[in-house]
Image (cartoon, rainbow, N blue to C red):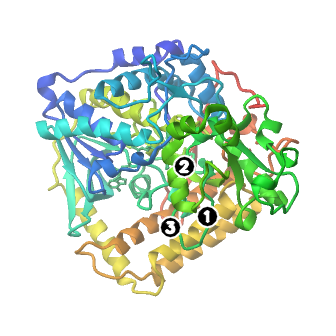
Amino acid sequence: MLEAKIPSGPIEQQWDKGRLEMKLVNPANRRKHSIIVVGAGLAGAAAAATLGEQGYHVQCFSYHDTPRRAHSIAAQGGINAAKNYRNDGDSVFRLFKDTVKGGDYRAREANVYRLAQISNNIIDQCVAQGVPFAREYGGLLDTRSFGGVQVQRTFYARGQTGQQLLLGAYQALEEQLAAKTVTMHIRTELLDVVIVNGRARGIVTRNLVTGEIECHAADVIVLATGGYSNVFYYSTNAKACNCTAIWRDYRRGALFGNPCFTQIHPTCIPLSSEHQSKLTLMSESLRNDGRIWVPKKKGDTRSPKDIPENERDYYLERRYPGFGNLVPRDVASRNAKEVCDEGRGVGPNGQGVYLDFADAIHRLGLETVREKYGNLFDIYERITGEDAYTVPMRIYPAPHYTMGGLWVDYRLMSTIPGLFVAGEANFSDHGANRLGASALMQGLADGYFILPSTVPDYLATTALDPVDTSHAAFTAMKTEVTNRIKSLIAINGKRSPDSFQRELGKLMWDECGMARSDAGLRKALARIPELREEFWHNLRIIGGDEELNQALENANRASDFLELAELMCVDALNRTESCGGHFRVESQTPEGEAKRDDANFCYSAAWEWKGPGQAPALHKEPLTFEYVPLSQRSYK
Ligand SMILES: Cc1cc2nc3c(=O)[nH]c(=O)nc-3n(C[C@H](O)[C@H](O)[C@H](O)COP(=O)(O)OP(=O)(O)OC[C@H]3O[C@@H](n4cnc5c(N)ncnc54)[C@H](O)[C@@H]3O)c2cc1C
């Protein structure tokens, strides 16, 4: 059933060969086809703009009030590409190899190779759009390092790379809006997908301002709706990020790939109060120059400046001399947890480690450090009240990115024909751990380069019946969506949507977060259905459904998180190996590193919804490693 549809031949030629084999749609016929793109972040805006430019009739949807507010705007550190401007040994093959290894051999080789190839086109495209990447004195684009690699391949625009890339994609989208090839539907949330004769043919949405439930038909649906880290409640994602779009599609037959593969980012500002609503990232780029340490002694409460060098433990540099502070995120996060669990953490509650710039300031000068990272230091000061130029930052791991998502084949099509998935929403190319600066690369590869080849091929090779919103399938889905919204309002209980999500998030962080055990996962699997039951009997939403109602929006999203969380735990329980960010305490090396079990788990797990109260069915996509042979990851 699971066919990845990878073109045959040597890996370096697969994408070119595949594209040559794909059918085209003649320009005069393109305007006869309609495409729905849900999401206007980097992946969605890039796809909508490019398909619009090709001449298709595109409708783009976002729950935000403008595409510019998509969560991609938050990306700070940078975007990878194998340009090798530094002449430090980089190549397409090295980027490919680093990514396969970084993901702990749980990604599809062919996709990762294609991503590395396309990385160079992305930089050219963005430069042509005017994205203001940092430059060196000589004029070449500047680069820096991110975790898990030993070259400098990360292109950046200060600490605002996502924002600048999104402005580029937004400009391209605006051009198509003006040309009327793309129609934008803002503050409109997808609540379900419509399937006609086994193919995705439309969506049902709620207008977030008026509450109106509407139907939209098309020949193809593209989901680019971002990740689901907010299942943990506290995460570096914006409050509104949610799983509804992919979850509703899962319930309609799209398989969900590796739901338990989530990334905990090592450098976030520690939680300071249970009442705060989210966590703030301090970009990984800071690990280029910042040194991470904790006191050697347990319970040492002295101020950092009073702790002499020989009483500090630069534990990453000590344990991983080869990569030092730039080990991949999963490794850095687990080590931070370990030293804090040993009682050597710093700050209130001991949930923090130092990220210290004293050496960098001494070596490079204050002005250089300010120029490279100034806006991050400003954010840190605004949140903590501390000046990181004079005292070390305190950081702690936090949920950040989800490698899991809807399963897609090489062409980014899900198991529902006609439903394509791009960006963080798909189960993607990162395996069990994403290397820093690779998400922007993947989202833009999907949107600017892959979908614009694979969607036309689908249109050119598929006989599509004419379908519009008067079809019975739309009427039925509209009724179902309306009833669901009304039933949420009708519960009229006592607990707010947020209180359920907070409780769910804590449970997920404790039992399905940085460390996962058989007993903990079973505990979560027992509690989640109880919490869901309570949700459907004791939820209270203030206000009605025919108006702007954020409590209703939150409740609707929470109802999906309450189901997704269970699937994540099922997946984590099934995978009794450790790999990347999925750390099963029962499976570790004597040094405490993740221990894979390639004999039994060298596959992507793709789960099928079997109905409420039914166990999901597991499908396996076997993974083979022909070009980067399987080996134990080492960053020593
Ligand atoms: C703080 C932070 C910093 C980061 N820094 C980096 C970095 O330096 N480098 C890097 O490579 N990666 C970084 N990442 C990761 C990267 O930013 C994201 O993975 C990526 O931007 C996701 O893009 P996307 O287009 O898939 O989704 P998003 O940008 O999240 O866009 C989702 C879109 O879908 C819409 N949407 C969602 N659901 C619905 C629905 N049901 N109906 C209608 N519309 C919907 C939203 O309105 C939005 O337009 C960072 C992430 C965070 C949280």
Q: Position of residue 550 (x, y in %)?
A: 34, 71
User: Which of label 2 and label 3 is nearer to you?
Assistant: 2
Q: Measured along the vertical axis of the image, is residue 300 above or below residue 78? A: below
Count neighbours of disc 2 (C-alpha within 10 A) and say few if under 14, some if 14 to 19, many if 20 or more: some
Count neighbours of disc 1 (C-alpha within 10 A) and say few if under 14, some if 14 to 19, many if 20 or more: many
Count neighbours of disc 3 (C-alpha within 10 A) and say few if under 14, some if 14 to 19, many if 20 or more: some
Q: Measured along the vertical axis of the image, is residue 53 above or below residue 304? A: above
Q: CA distance from mark 2 to mark 3?
A: 21 Å
Q: CA distance from mark 3 to mark 1?
A: 10 Å
Number of marks in the image?
3
Please report whichever mark, 3 or 1, sits nearer to the chain's N-terminal start: 1
Q: Position of residue 139 (x, y in %)?
A: 42, 18
Q: Measured along the vertical axis of the image, is residue 455 above or below residue 610? A: above
Give the residue number, with chain letter if any, for mark 2: 377
Do the CB atoms of the residues marked 3 and 1 lie less than 8 Å apart? no
Please report whichever mark, 2 or 3, sits nearer to the chain's N-terminal start: 3
Secondary structure under tag 2 reads helix
Q: Amino acid at mark 3?
A: Ser
Residue 277, label in figure: 3
